[in-house]
Image (tube, rainbow, N blue to C red):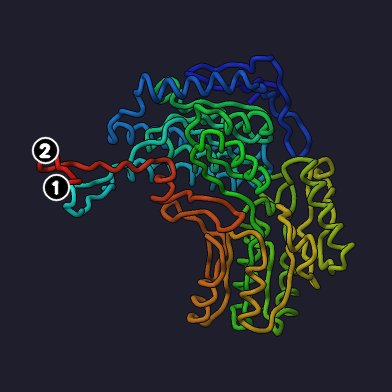
Amino acid sequence: MKAMELQKMYIDGSWVEGSEGKSRPTINPANQEVLAEVTQGTLEDVKKAVAAAKRSFYVTREWRDMDSQTRGDFLLRIADEIEKEKETLARLDCMDHGKPLREAEADVDDAIHNFRYYAGLIKAPYGGAYDVNEGFGKMHSYTVHEPVGVCALITPWNYPLLMAVWKLAPSLAAGNSVILKPSSNCVLSCVKLFEIFERVGMPKGSVNLVLGPGSSIGNALAEDPDVDMVAFTGSTEVGQSIMRAAAGNVKKVGLELGGKSPNVIFADADLEGAVEWSMIGIFLNQGEVCSAGSRILVEESLKDKFVARLKERANAITIGNPMENPDMGPLVTKEHMEKVLSYIQSGIDEGATLVCGGTRYTEGECAKGYFVRPTIFTDCTDEMRIVNEEIFGPVVTVQTFKTEQEAIDMANNTEYGLAGAVFTSDGSRALRVIKEIRAGITWINCYNPTFNEAPWGGYKKSGIGRELGIHGLEEYQEIKQININLNPGIVGWYEH
């Protein structure tokens, strides 16, 4: 990619600039270099994209009415083209977001598998037939799944390509026409993905890309009466505003929101395994992960050994240019780095003990980047902001418990319910405790593995609905009931 190259939107089968001709730079967070200029969409551009998707779904109907085999073949071709562009897509996410290159490569692999998974899933049996009473004569009842219609997909910056694919693959597999609005901070891999859509010949208007700020573009999509569904991944606060905006036409809503997930470690756990998985749980992707294990709850008798080993491993983390595959790269923007650092300061001010990290990393070539050292706090209490609020960075709090019930109560003492984990060598206790944790995604003796085949989503303020697996496809479908009178004729229900 050439510096300052203008990244355009894709609306109704054409690449277009924003209607007001405005653009903004996208910045490499490792060194503050400008990667490209990104056109900025307006409310007028939103209306054009919605009109194109609506026409595609309700008038031309090419994608909607395509048989499942042909639609699946399209998805497989998209996967093949992503595979051909794997190196380019990974480098774009690495430079645009700041994640280490190997993590960006893993994201591209997951995107490939996701399209292939849904290409196969739409050929699986679905629907149902029901035995019903004969109060109205001889009847037969069955259900079919149909696409929702025009779907607006609003995605975050922490997994630019992958989070877009998590929504695009199932919504397209279901036969919807879509409008993608990626985060303004990281758009480059999504633009490349739409080049692939154009290359494989996606029908005009079936896929649309709108770029611009979420406060205006995202809200306009959620409010638009011609949008039949809005799916959003991001903060709980924005998710709440999406729900309010979507209420106008009572559109279907899918939300994957924030988290403050507990990682419960009992004294009988394998120490090295628990430490290594806890490292993945909080420092993967610089901690910019909604399901991050940001609250470690460790049994009191193990606390000193666990914290000492966790500190040793955290201090050994390499930080640097993400293209050179360090353990951690920079945070996504200067504003986000400052937010994370302000949380660290609040932890210090409120009396938590800073075990390691806690400062910006500016050594060598990292001087201009938005790097933050991996940070561990102990002596934390439930009232502290660092314990209660989602930080979305490489910051973890450690608290202790004495009994199993205390661990459960502490784990559930949060308004969120996205994820959680339990580490113990006692299988019965593992199952007992994990069942009591009020969260949608849980692990035993590991943290963060994610699978295309299994559902992803949260309880409480962590969201509504599920992504991935068959549930991810059903999110973008409506269920229609069809009832057939097998003995035609009028039945007078009022006759006795």
Left or right side of 176 for 145: left
In percent of width and height, residue 460 lies at 59, 58
**Quarter of the image where one finds residue 375:** bottom right
Q: Is residue 237 left or right of residue 355?
A: left
Against 34, residue 280 (above or below) is below
Frontmost residue, 38 versus 419: 419
Report whether residue 201 is seen.
no
Q: Secondary structure at mark 2?
A: loop
Q: Amino acid at mark 1?
A: Gly
Q: CA distance from mark 2 to mark 1?
A: 9 Å
Are the two marked residues, 2 and 1, in contact with CB atoms closer than 8 angstroms? Answer: yes
Name the residue located 57 percent from the left edge and 68 percent from the top edge.
421
| Image position of 149 (left or right of 256) | left
Number of numbered labels in the structure image: 2
The residue lying toward the viewer, choosing from 485 and 130, is 485
Q: Position of residue 412 (x, y in %)?
A: 63, 68
Quadrant of residue 296 within the rendered picture: bottom right
Residue under label 2, please give it: 489
Callout 1 crowding tier (Cα within 10 Å): few <14, some 14–19, many ≥20: some
Where disc 1 sits, the SS reads loop
Q: Which residue is mark 1?
A: 137
The answer to which of marks 2 and 1 sits earlier in the sequence is 1
Answer left or right for 167 relative to 131.
Answer: right
Category of crowding for the residue at label 2, using alpha-carbon neighbours closer than 10 angstroms: few (below 14), some (14–19), many (at least 20):
few
